Each structure stands twice: as C-alpha cells, then as structure tokens.
Amino acid sequence: MSDDEMRPAGLEGVFTDGERLYTRNSAPGKTVYGERLVTHEGVQYREWVPTRSKLAAYIRAGGRFFPFRPGTNVLYLGAASGTTASHVADIVTPGTVYCVEISPRSFRDLVPVCESRPNMVPFLADATKPSEYAFAVSSVDVVYQDIAQKGQAQIFLKNFSAFGAKSGLLVIKSRSEDVTQDPLRTYEASRKQLLSGGLRVEEVVRLDPMEKDHAMIAVTSG
C-alpha cells in the first residue's frame, strides 16, 4: 500500500484509503466481526464498516461532531457484542470505554472482545439504572448510547448527568419509541427532550439508508 492510500479521514483517529473507513487496531491480529485488516507502514488498521456500526454510518452520512480523542473516557450504553465499542476503544486508547450491555447473550460475545482490549470494561447491567455500574465508573467525558427501548432520550439524560459527561452521541431508533409515528417526528421529540434536559444539540443526522429509521443526535453540556 502506497503512502497516499491510507490517510487521516478528518476526524480524530479515523483513517481512509479513499473508499473505506479504518481505525488503528489496538489489538493487532485480532478482528471483532470479521472486518478487513490492513497493514501500512508497520501499523495495522481495521476496516470500520458503516452497515455494521451506527457510528461509522454517522460519519458516512456527514456527521462531524466527534468527541473522541486519545485519553477520552467513554460510557458506552448498549455495547452489544462490541463492534462499535471496539473501534471507539481503538481511538481513545489509553482512555477507557465502559461497556454496558443488558443482554446476557450479547454480553457473552462482548467479554472476549474486552479481554483483548484492556481499555474496554464490560458490565452486564441495565442502562436505566446507572447505580448498577456507578461503583466502577466515577466520571466520563462522553456518553454514547445505542439501545433499543422506549424512552431513549431520558435514559441518556440520566446517565449524562450521573457521570458528569461533557458531550455525547445518542442513536435514536424511531421504531423502538413508536412504530406508528413518522421517524422525523420521533427525532424531533427526542431533540426537544434533550434541550429540555439542559443539553445543547450540536446536530441531528439521519442514518438512512445504512440504518433505516435511525438518527444520531450529538450533544454537549449546556
């Protein structure tokens, strides 16, 4: 691969070969979801697939609010099996990604991913109950949330406040809120809830067609 084929993508810790997105692999030789590995100038990169990661879909859809940096501590709500969380961990190393997942089945897949990345800490817990993991999470810089249940904005606000976050990204799954409502109305209702909760909304980006009926809302503390 020539020097001009792997370059920064304009967001901290995100790279591109002109077509695909990548993060530096913080666990060289290991994949999480069968993603492509590329080595360039002695550094291994993992392809970040937009159809497998809503954060990558957000970047592809033009999202520009990106609060992740080396050393950033992240509370990740709804980590599932660790696909997106592992890319975040690549970017924020040596910062920590606290991964909260309520499903025992997904958690079983998440644990080995965390074992290969020491800056990922897994919690089998309910995101509606921050007290279940507050014993190990003192404060964070960023809250990232991707959960499929009603009341997504309120759950986000509860965690944002509990851990003193400065910024965050919230995936809104419109069908989890109200399957009968126009997704745009759902996104707007969620935006207003975040504003009412004292947060500043930086942008709202629809993730279609990569993630149908989903949007990402980026916020900072008010």
Image (cartoon, rainbow, N blue to C red):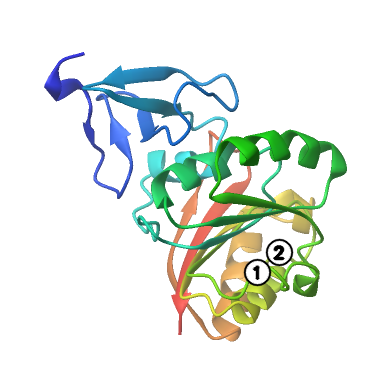
The quarter of the picture where residue 14 lies is top left
User: Rounded to the nearest whole Å, what is the CA distance between mark 1 and mark 2?
Assistant: 6 Å
Within the image, what quadrant is residue 184 found in? bottom right
Residue beneath the point at 63% across and 41% down: 114
Residue visible at 60% across and 84% down in the picture: 197
Tell me the kind of residue under disc 1: Phe
Residue neighbourhood size for the residue with mark 2, other residues' Cα within 10 Å, grouped as few (<14), some (14–19), many (≥20): many
Q: Quadrant of the C terminus?
A: bottom left
In percent of width and height, residue 174 lies at 69, 53
- The image quarter containing residue 8 is top left
Describe residue 7's horizontal placement relative to residue 67 as left or right.
left
Residue 116 picture location, percent across and down: 58, 35
Q: Is residue 68 above or below residue 53?
A: below
Looking at the image, is 66 positioned above or below residue 194?
A: above
Residue beneath the point at 76% across and 63% down = 127
Work out whether 139 lies above or below 178. below
Question: Is there CB contact under 8 Å for labels 1 and 2?
Answer: yes
Q: Identify the secondary structure beneath mark 2.
A: helix
List the residue tagged with mark 1.
Answer: 156
The residue pinned by badge 2 equals 152
* Residue farthest along the top direction in this orientation: 1
